[in-house]
């Protein structure tokens, strides 16, 4: 996309009253976080549908935690990229009202974003299988973490196959989307529901949808702007253009 088109996108963002962003695996792939889809997808090495389930954890919590600890170590070596950092900067400036992510890697939080709605949970947060205890790990887990309150097993606070999304988080997500007049969709396959339909809620309210992706998706035909490229390069360029509007 040329600078003229980027200028149009920056203009749309600057005129927005309620700008939200939705991020998927693509934004983190630029930080070398392996994705579940694509050539380096984790599903090529592990069958996630057999490991990421409540029944798998009940049957063999040690194996499940071994897999998650491996992922934590892998992701712990990755750093937030310029796209993560730009979104955090936009939040600080009041440009971005809400950040919704399908990712569980915690890179948005490490980049400095404060108000992140993590639809699928957080790989670094654990919760007790018996009580209401939750905590956030700073390093990869060792063995099976135990609850300091009741001594039961802690599990990753992520949404496993067969589980419902957190209703409190989803309520907040839909409230943000209903208010949004501009939505930026970054690095999502637009295949995983319900997140794939989030931008359509904004469209139904006559909002503007901006897609940033290396490839076209099923969402591309309905968006107002499709920017083909790396978010880590495009978002800083947009930020420079937005600074001219200030």
Image (tube, rainbow, N blue to C red):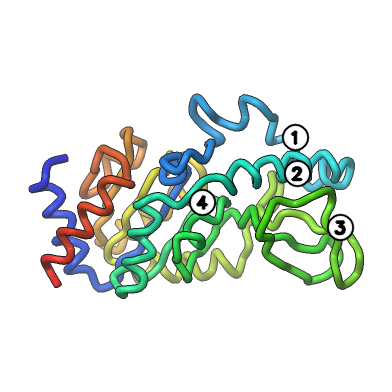
Q: Which residue is mark 3?
A: 153
Residue 19 at what x, y percent from top left?
30, 66
Camera sees residue 190? no
Q: Residue furthest left?
A: 4
Q: Earlier in the sequence, mark 4 or mark 2?
A: 2
Residue 106: image tag? none
Q: Nearer the viewer, mark 3 or mark 2?
A: 3
Lower sequence index among marks 4 and 3: 4
Residue located at (38% from left, 68% from top): 178
Relative to the observer, which residue lies in front, 163 or 65? 65
Mark-to-mark CA distance, 1 and 2: 7 Å
Spatial distance from mark 4 to mark 1, Cα to Cα?
A: 20 Å
Q: Position of residue 1 (x, y in %)?
A: 16, 40
Cα distance, mark 3 to mark 2? 15 Å
Q: Vertically, is 10 above or below 186?
A: below
Crowd around label 1: few <14 · some 14–19 · many ≥20 (10 Å): few
Would you name the residue on which mark 1 appears? 50
Q: Nearer the viewer, mark 3 or mark 1?
A: 3
Q: Which residue is mark 4?
A: 102
Disc 1 on helix, strand or loop?
A: helix
Q: Taking the image as drawn, is residue 149 in sight?
A: yes
User: Is residue 66 placed above or below 209 in the rendered structure?
Assistant: above
Residue under pointer 2: 53
Q: Is residue 196 left or right of residue 73?
A: left
Q: Residue at x 28, y 70 (%)?
A: 95
Q: What is the x, y in percent for residue 98?
A: 40, 67
| Residue 47 sits in quarter | top right
């Amino acid at each position: 996309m040329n600078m003229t088109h980027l200028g149009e996108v920056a203009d749309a963002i600057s005129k927005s009253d309620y700008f939200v962003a939705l991020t998927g695996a693509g934004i983190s792939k630029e930080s070398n976080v392996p994705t579940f889809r694509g050539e380096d997808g984790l599903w090529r090495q592990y069958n996630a549908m057999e490991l990421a389930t409540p029944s798998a954890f009940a049957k063999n919590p040690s194996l499940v935690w071994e897999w998650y600890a491996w992922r934590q170590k892998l992701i712990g070596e990755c750093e937030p990229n310029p796209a993560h950092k730009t979104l955090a900067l936009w939040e600080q400036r009041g440009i971005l009202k809400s950040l919704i992510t399908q990712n569980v890697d915690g890179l948005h939080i490490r980049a400095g974003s404060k108000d992140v709605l993590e639809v699928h949970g957080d790989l670094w947060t654990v919760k007790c299988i018996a009580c209401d205890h939750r905590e956030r790990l700073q390093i990869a887990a060792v063995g099976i973490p135990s609850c300091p309150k009741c001594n039961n097993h802690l599990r990753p606070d992520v949404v496993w196959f067969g589980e419902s999304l957190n209703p409190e988080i989803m309520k907040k997500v839909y409230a943000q989307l209903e208010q949004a007049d501009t939505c930026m969709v970054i690095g999502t396959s637009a295949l995983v529901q319900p997140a794939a339909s989030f931008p359509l809620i904004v469209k139904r309210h006559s909002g503007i949808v901006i897609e940033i992706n290396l490839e076209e998706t099923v969402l591309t035909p309905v968006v107002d702007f499709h920017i083909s490229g790396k978010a880590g390069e495009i978002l800083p360029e947009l930020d420079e253009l937005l600074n001219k509007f200030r």
